[in-house]
Amino acid sequence: MEFAELIKTPRVDGVVLHRPFMPTVEGTLCLTGHHLILSSRQDNTEELWLLHANIDSIEKRFIGSLGTIIVKCKDLRVIQLDIPGMEECLNIASSIEALSTLDSVSLMYPFFYRPLFEVIEDGWQLFVPEEAFKDLESMTDEWRLSEVNKDFSVCPSYPSLLTVPKDIDDESLCKAASFRHGGRFPVLSYYHKKNGMVMMRAAQPLTGTNGRRCKEDEKLINATLCAGKRGYIIDTRTVAVAQQAKARGGGFEQEANYPQWRRIHKAVERSNVLQESLIKLVEACNDQSHSMDRWLSKLEASNWQSNVKEILTTACLAAQCIDREGASVLVHGTEGTDSTLQVTSLAQIILDPACRTIRGFEVLIEREWLQAGHPFQQRCAQSAYSNGKPRSEAPVFLLFLDCVWQILRQFPCSFQFNENFLIMLFEHAYASQFGTFLGNSVAERLKLLLSQKTVSLWSWVNRPQELERFLNPLYEPNNLVIWPSVAPQSLLLWEGVFLRWNRSSKCLDEANQEMVHIIEYNKELQNKVNSLRRQLAQLETEDGPLQTP
Amino acid sequence: MSCTEVWWSEMEHIKMPKVENVRLVDRSSSRRTQVGTLYLTATHTIFVGKGSEDRSELWVLHSLVCNVLKHKASQSGYPLLIHCKNFQVIQFIIPQESDCHNVYISLSRLSRPEKYEELYCFSFNPNVDKAERGHSWDFLDLKAEYSRMGLPDKLWHVTAINREYRVCDTYPADLFVPKSVTLPVIIGSSKFRSRGRFPTLSYYCKENHATICRSSQPLSGFSARCLEDEQMLQAIMKSNPGSRFMYVVDTRPKLNAMANRAAGKGYENEDNYCNIKFQFIGIENIHVMRNSQQKLIEVSTLRSPSMGEFLTGLENSDWLRHIKSIMEAAVFISKAVAEEGVSVLVHCSDGWDRTAQVCSVASVLLDPYYRTLKGLMVLIEKDWISFGHKFSHRCGHLDGEAKEVSPVIDQFLECVWQLMKQFPCYFEYNEKFLISIHDHVYSCHYGNFICNSQKERKDLCIKEKTHSIWPHLWENKLDFTNPLFKPDQSQNQGLLRPRTAPYCFKYWRRLYNRFDRELHPRQSELDCLMTVKEETQQLEEELALYEQKLAVLDKERAKALYMQKGVLESKQTLWSLPLDTSLANTPQDYIGGFIGGAPNVFTLQQGERENAELCLFGDKPKSSDADNSDQESGVADFSSHSSGEESLPSEDSVKDPDSDETGPNRE
């Protein structure tokens, strides 16, 4: 096994672990193919099990023969290991570096992980396109399931089954695909049951500088409009950026060719800018200077909160067009795999109460992120402590989760899940024992045989024992469309992620427990009262004919 | 001058008692306005909406008006902007210029009373008799508070020296000093302190005998010293037998304190006082704080700011930096007392602004009692009201020196709020309590926060002529209770150790954007939990009743009980419904007027849209909407449970049909 070659020193004794807000632990450090383990071999102290894949970067320094390794994790935690012996320290450091940057996906931990729990419900079957289509068919007959992308040749980043307008044949789809970036022709993203309006998503049209057009593309999206109605195209880029895209063969829909559509440009940042934003934000959160001015100006300069606001605003706009204006919407940016998905998935959370349940949210992630071809592997290769040249990593999914958290804060009774659920998803997107977030597209995942060789995250999450941690005690289902406020005063910094390791969670945990306790006690009393009431009623009927009040 | 005379004289200021066809502009969206009639009374500005169905009312106390501005005429009329001290901003558009001017002149005068007698508390006349009024002033008893602290004891006693307010006219009549100091020492010390505010006890920790004492700055200049003052400090130090030194904390920036020396004031010279450790803590003065809050208010009232504008504005206001500095001072003092067992003397210049802030925040950190409803009232009564925080000047109750106005008490309340955010289970009260206190500090509705000192209040016969706020707040304590409060734990959790990293300080949206309803969470965790708790209590009572009845097993009783069944069944899910579902279904302006403003074939007309919203979630449920029928019944149920703020006089200044807070318009 090649892991052994990478592990120069498998274990060192007398290593001291420092973590913020926790007592230091002295113990034995062990390196395995996938984990960094620190064990104190005392019964009551916690061991540290850290996935190599979770390590974003390391720093080492020496004072005499005592070496120190600072490990910075993708979940934003920073820990310090004091290792006696310079050679051991250097060996450990270089092993960690090698093991945390393995290139081959098939060497990742999910391929080696064997669950210690019984898989009751296979998470790989959580979302079945055919079944989802059956639901759609029960509401409308204007759509069909196309197999045009069966072998992923029309669009490598799309799944094999796609929902398209009934009247558009596969040949037209192929032509429309050749007119869209990466072959991502317009497909159905969401059907709004209340008024029959739809949201579609695509990539940018390849109009180029000479204003190419494609009749099939026009026909395809017009087929989604009711007679006499107009729709909105939401381009997540600013007009200037969209104009510039023309020079590289991209572009946007010209009014002349799409007279029934009204185009709106928004300013959702591209992924490389987002990565920069995350790095700056985390740096601001870890700043030890204790100066208020510095904190606020760094927070502002990171632009993270602006990004949250922009994405959320765009999603609200899409939802507003559908629900309030009664219009159908097409959303796209450049590639249609990042900002587009942020907007379409958030709009669904606003519009569709089903997406606010745990299962519904899981399905949303399967459908709008995994199946829709968000390149998780590339985007989550590095997190905020990456110091190498940025390649294609970007916190696109984290920003989406942040936006969901913002809505959750504003509607604390409308979500079945709690903040921990979102944090868990963030962690697993970046490093996991499960195969769910491996690969960049359905095609890649099939090739990796993920569903046979790895366990799905959902198989684990959906077990009742695990679910309990993720339930929101205040949840009460409602059918409302929930319109969040996007004012700066209403958007908060997501402390649960960004300040998680810089604060003690004791008081907040206590508050959460108390909340659960209040509600459970209430339910318990209700049950008691109801049963006593029944008892009394029974006594009464036994005693004689019932007198109806 | 009797109240009626005052009332008549105020009527003279009203040049225009009534204006028709005034538009009230919704600040979240200038396209939404409401037409109605504007009335000016001796005490309130009242706007009554004209709509046949939505007869909403807006009441604004004149004493809450901070300033009135006329804006440039628009095509629809003459805008009048009213900024209130509780951060409400109201915009009217008045059709006629002369009317607008008259309202402007009247309001400008009415909102700046020249005499105490003009204040609302002197004309506010709830239906209570004289005895009850007197009783309301006895609700809080500072003597009881000192004895709760363990005073008097063998080392501390009350001095009668200031009974007639002769030694210090801004101090209360009863003051605690070390038993060992003689009257000449007190008098000598008081002569050596600004305004005669000699060192006296503010908080006593009976477990370790450490104290927080307060005073004003010494008149030390560059070299002056005062033997009696030195003896006074020595006595304070010695009254804490376990300690070998005491801290003297000057809450001013060192530079300010040094500048004061040139004026014959200054700070304690460590060489002259035995065993003191002197410490500067740089909290800025009232002028800096006033400007800072002004900037903060400007930021909070920006119309659809970008994130960058907001954060930059927040930073430039320096407001959170000031809050942090007050908190840090309080943390220093509370640790000195609780952890080191060392007494602390706190002063600033006059000892009634920064000193009051720091002593009271430190007390909240030290003593769980001040984290209870009653305790916070007592603390404000003691450290702020009795010790002569100049409420009239700082809050601008009367027309006067603008430079005296400063949000000193706002900062205290905000520090408590920041602590509540860090310690959600350790406070008996919730943020509504703080906001309500803030409201009453400025509203002049009750007499508590009138005048600048105890002596002034006595001279004005405040207790005979006005009512006290405290019993009123106490009666509404259900609304002010934090559902997460865990009393037992809190008692054990003596000293709070808050974190003071910059990111621990938040912008207080509920205060500064209090009236911008669309900015707040549409469902409130707090309200939800409060309702659950209330229901739980009912269930407990019902359960006890059932158990009792079952035990007796009386046939007739069982029958009678059966008749009552269903009362609770119908309420079972009432808590789960958010108060603000009406808002949930109102999208914001996400594109800056693009959709509504554009000529678009399928855009709803404004009126239609609002109607649609009203039908869906307003007061008139339409059964045709199957999807929402559940919610509607929920809302209706909920209103019977709606928060009791309706009974709070100042809260009824907003009467808006779709408000979740007010009672009268709900069924």
Image: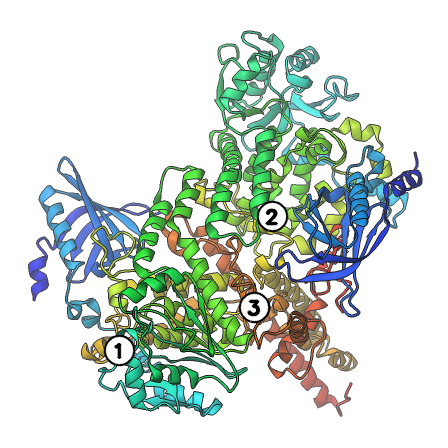
Q: Which residue is mark 3?
A: B598
Q: Are labels 1 and 2 on one chain?
A: no
Q: Which residue is mark 1?
A: A442
Closer to the camera in the image, A101 or A279: A279
Distance, label 1 to label 2, CA atoms, is 49 Å
Residue at which label 2 appears: B512
| Front-most of residues A531 and A505 | A505
Q: What's the amino acid at mark 3?
A: Ala
Quarter holding the C terminus of chain B is bottom right
Q: Report the residue at 75% width, 78% height from top.
A: B564
Placement of A425 over or under B265, stated as above or below: below
Q: Are marks 1 and 3 on the same chain?
A: no
Horizontal arrangement in the rendering, residue A231 relative to residue A97 (left or right): right
Q: Can you see residue B243?
A: no
Residue under the point 23% across and 71% down? A439
**Up/down of A277 relative to B659, above or below:** above
- Give the letter of the chain under mark 3: B
Quarter of the image with the N terminus of chain B in it: top right
Nearer-N-terminus badge (2/3)? 2
Q: CA distance from mark 2 to mark 3?
A: 33 Å
Quarter holding residue A545: bottom right
Q: Amino acid at mark 1?
A: Val
Q: Position of residue B454 (x, y in %)?
A: 76, 29
> What secondary structure is found at the residue carrying circle 1?
helix
Q: Are marks 2 and 3 in contact (CB under 8 Å)?
A: no
Rendering coords of residue A97 (x, y %): 16, 54
Label 2: few (<14), some or many (≥20) within 10 Å? some
Residue A246 located left or right of residue B662: left
Q: Position of residue A309 (x, y in %)?
A: 46, 58
Q: Are marks 2 and 3 on the same chain?
A: yes
